[in-house]
Amino acid sequence: MTPSASVPHTGRRLGDVAAVAERLAVSKRHVLRLCDAGRLPRPIRLGRLVRWDLDAIDEWIAAGCPRVERRGDR
């Protein structure tokens, strides 16, 4: 069995910090600062990997980059 065969495909496009930084035209470090401040949609953690749903990022940008409300943060 291949590794991809054991994981169901959800259709989500996931991107790393570099992909988000490119979309926002900022540095990778600035993306991490925005995330820490709660100003980006919450990332998805896959073990030690941190990824963002790129569709959610695009929707967030289209909405004017509003502050993200989070309940029960951390």
Image (spheres, rainbow, N blue to C red):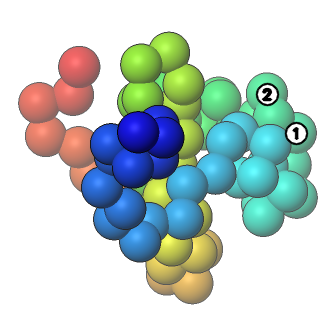
Q: Tell me which residue sits at (30%, 55%) in the image.
A: 8
Q: Tell me which residue sits at (78%, 64%) in the image.
A: 23
> Is 16 drawn above or below residue 9 in the view shown?
above
Answer whether residue 66 is visible to the viewer in this image.
no
How far across and down, in percent of the image, does residue 20 sit? 71, 52
Q: Amino acid under label 2?
A: Arg
**Residue lying furthest left:** 72
User: Would residue 15 appear left or right of 46 to someone viewing this image?
Assistant: right
Q: Which mark is residue 29?
A: 2
How far across and down, in percent of the image, does residue 35 sit? 53, 35
Count of residue discs: 2
The answer to whether mark 2 and mark 1 are in CB contact below 8 A is: yes
Q: Amino acid under label 1?
A: Ser
Q: Tell me which residue sits at (41%, 30%) in the image.
A: 45
**Is residue 7 or residue 61 the one in the foreground?**
7
Quadrant in which residue 51 is drawn:
top right
How far across and down, in percent of the image, does residue 48 sit? 50, 15
